[in-house]
Image (tube, helix red, strand yellow):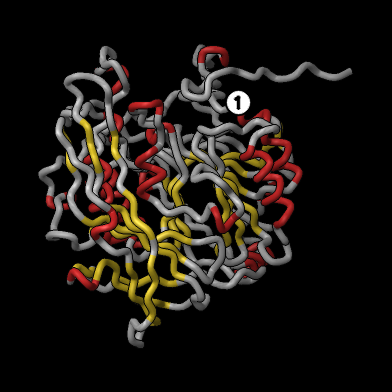
Amino acid sequence: MVLLPPEARQQSQQILYSLFQLSLVTHNLSAIVDGGGVPTTLDGPFKPVTVPLDQSFRAVDLPDTDPLVQRTVQGFQPEQISLSLSASHDSVWISWITGEFQIGDNIEPLDPETVASIVQYGRLGRSMRHNATGYSIVYSQLYPFEGLQNYTSGIIHHVRLTGLRPNTLYQYQCGDPSLSAMSDVHYFRTMPVSGPKSYPSRIAVVGDLGLTYNTTSTVDHMTSNHPDLILLVGDVSYANLYLTNGTGADCSSCSFSNTPIHETYQPRWDYWGRYMQPLISSVPVMVIEGNHEIEEQAENQTFVAYSSRFAFPSEESGSSSTFYYSFNAGGIHFIMLGAYISYDKSGDQYRWLERDLASVDREVTPWLIATWHAPWCSTYGAHYREAECMRVEMEDLLYKYGIDIVFNGHVHAYERSNRVYNYTLNPCGPVYITVGDGGNREKMAITHADEPGQCPEPSTTPDDYMGGLIRNPPIKR
């Protein structure tokens, strides 16, 4: 297999836009390489290259007064419409929200039974004579502390369409026709059938997106490149950089260290969904959780907004969790892993991963790509070896099955590695690509751990949520 040459480190203002084009049509790439134009990763290792960050970049959140994030529908008309894939080309999920969220002391959750979850759809150029029904939920973010405002969402709908044709353009409307509350017509194209010469034309991969003016540059760049699929590798809305009264900061733990719990301002999720709708109502987005989705609340609940707002092909891929799942996109098998749920060899996620990897037919899906939030392989001082415990548990298994590429976020920079296994150059290891520079309001990572005096002590950097530290095992003699 061939990839673009992986210079070990690159960071530039242009890559703030976080679009990595996967030109994966095998025969085209082979033709390029045969002509001597582009080397493969096996021609490496390549020398490190670092491009300094343009310090003029500033990430400022879109305010709630911005027209791009304001509610523009009435009553129970759908908003925040999004599309996600099922496990194979013949099925997709349509999601949307009806009704208004509530925030304050005296909130009364909406009744999901009052509005139906219906999608009317058909192939482009034909009538939308097919109907699919789904389910709906409402979630709340509750705080058992005086002075903190509680939140309850609008009604969130998820409907799965099945029996779709591959690489075909469909049109659809969603909502409740009995209430005259249907959306405008939207369009999507299904994935190509899985096969060694069948691929999406372009895949956008982005992490740590947020909702800033830099985010709008990222999304504009993605939109102009017409991707067929978007991978969002964690840290979505950054609602947890805000107090429940709507006051935000670049570093919530620094500015709000005296709060009794890590607060969030859940309307930022609604603002994000409204802003993103023009893109993700037509282009499927596949999301995996990041640390900013933890969002603690009453009764030790976490990740509630993340698990409620998006549809995941968990059941279709044999997973029992929204934290890890897999799906095919043409000749690529994608594995989405959870860095904030148990990854121990004795745990459910590890056992699921073993089964999923064993079921992959590389004659049908030659490319095997994995994503999770916190990187194992990064030269930056920020979050240095923070996911070491996960690496120790899972790296051997991914190496055994020949993962080609790993995408991560978390570190707010762009970086691409040579092929690596166990911190050593290895022609059979994956290429690691970090795309944690999507546009959020937190600072960019600039300092590298290999710069003099900049290497953190690993014992000081374990992940706060997962906890613990597994050091390298002793060498067997």
Q: In which quarter of the image is residue 187?
A: bottom left
Q: Quadrant of the N terminus?
A: bottom right
Task: Choose between 400 and 422: the one closer to the eye.
Answer: 400
- The secondary structure type at the circle numbered 1 is helix
Residue type at tag 1: Glu
> 278 left or right of 316?
left
Relative height, residue 344 to residue 337 (above, below): above
Q: In which quarter of the image is residue 472?
A: top right
Report the residue that reaches farthest toward the left. Answer: 65
- At horizontal 24% and vertical 20% (from top left) the residue drawn is 145
Q: Label 1: which residue?
A: 388
Q: Is residue 457 visible?
A: yes
Residue 362: x and y, percent?
72, 60
Q: Quadrant of the C terminus?
A: top right
Q: Quadrant of residue 240?
A: top left
- Dot 1, crowdedness within 10 Å: few (<14), some or many (≥20)? many
Relative height, residue 267 to residue 19 (above, below): above
> 185 left or right of 134?
left
Task: Choose between 436 and 374: the one closer to the eye.
Answer: 374
Q: Is residue 52 visible?
A: no
Task: Choose between 242 and 91: the one closer to the eye.
Answer: 91
- At horizontal 54% and vertical 69% (from top left) the residue drawn is 89
